[in-house]
Image (cartoon, rainbow, N blue to C red):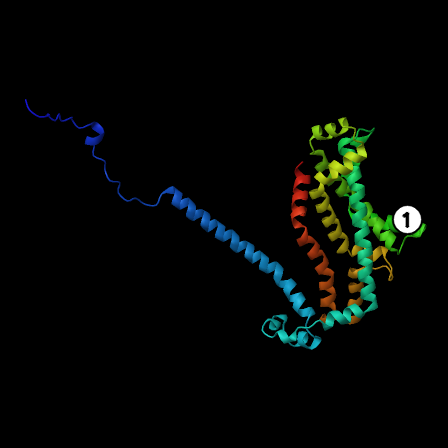
Amino acid sequence: MSGHSTIERPPTRRAAAVRPVPAPSAPGPRRRNRLSRLLNNSVVQGVLILVALVWITPLAGLLLSSMRSERDNASDGWWTALTDPSQLSLDNYSALLKDSGIAAAFGNTILISVPTTALVVAIAALAGYAFAWLEFPGRDGIFLVVVGLLVVPVQIGLLPVAKLFGAVGLFGTITGVVLFHVAYGLPFAIFLLRNYFAGIPREMLEAARMDGGSEWRIFSRLVLPLGRPAIASLAIFQFLWVWNDMLVALLFADSESQPLTVALQSQMRQFGSNISVLAPGAFLSLVVPLVVFFAFQRHFVQGVMAGSVK
């Protein structure tokens, strides 16, 4: 027997099996889901763009009207400035700021808004920490009273507080307006910061106390940095509310302490329908809170959401 014989092996089942070629099928669920998500995103984006246009259009109209002359505003609409930018100038703002009454009212608005915001934030932070982490008699009952004050409308306290301020000599002063805003801003501020501070892990505070930290040191070095989002959101909220307020200032402020909102309202009768005067004043009153809000909106959203769910 010469040479090597080749032994043929029987074909295996895997090799012998014939694999069918899959036929092309219709789009699967994954493709349909992707198309559905794309359509949903397009719809959401379209709605958001529409909402943004609805919100921005009056603001753009106010800005363009404030930069046009009285004759241009009387002859045609503000949208014509988009095709004819030569209509725009800062003369209206220059004339408005030269008005001593408006300039004084703008300064009064700052003197009212800034101290009010600082006092509300400082007092509410101290009270929120006390209600959250300090043990003292009647703590829960006092906090329930503070929460109950949230449902008291501002209008109920206008007349009694006006009589009280008149008796102590604070009626018609910036101090009186500031104290009223502080008193009615504290319930919500304390409620917000207390809920936020209560979410801080207890172990962290106990570790700080075991290391010899005093309550003031724990509050200033630990609680305040951790509560920065809530404190920032509270400051923005309080500042916007006080800056745009007209009801309280209209009652408690006199002609020398009135803020910008009251000054513009009181001059509407004098200027009538002169939009070249009212538009720049309204936009001047609007631009400051807009800048503050958009600069710190991230802290505003984080703080309000965190304080509301904890």
Front position in the image: 238 or 6: 6
* Image quarter in which the C terminus is found: top right
Residue lying furthest left: 1
Q: Residue at x 83, y 59 (%)?
A: 108
Query: Looking at the image, is 189 positioned above or below residue 215?
Result: below
Can residue 274 be seen by looking at this rendering? no
- Left or right: residue 177 versus residue 204 is right
- Left or right: residue 12 versus residue 43 is left
Can residue 296 be seen by looking at this rendering? yes
Identify the image quadrant of residue 134: top right
Q: Residue at x 83, y 63 (%)?
A: 104
Query: Looking at the image, is 256 positioned above or below residue 214?
Result: below
Front position in the image: 203 or 37: 203
Query: Looking at the image, is 307 positioned above or below residue 244?
Result: above
Q: Residue at x 67, y 69 (%)?
A: 65
Image coordinates of residue 271 in percent, x first then y, are 77, 71
Q: Residue at x 45, y 51 (%)?
A: 39
Q: Which residue is mark 1?
A: 164
Identify the image quadrant of residue 62: bottom right
Residue lying furthest front: 2
Query: Looking at the image, is 4 positioned above or below residue 198?
Result: above
Image coordinates of residue 73 in percent, x first then y, are 67, 74
Image coordinates of residue 237 in percent, x first then y, are 72, 49
Image coordinates of residue 189 in percent, x first then y, are 76, 43
> Regarding mark 1 in the picture, which secondary structure is present there?
helix
Q: Amino acid at mark 1?
A: Leu
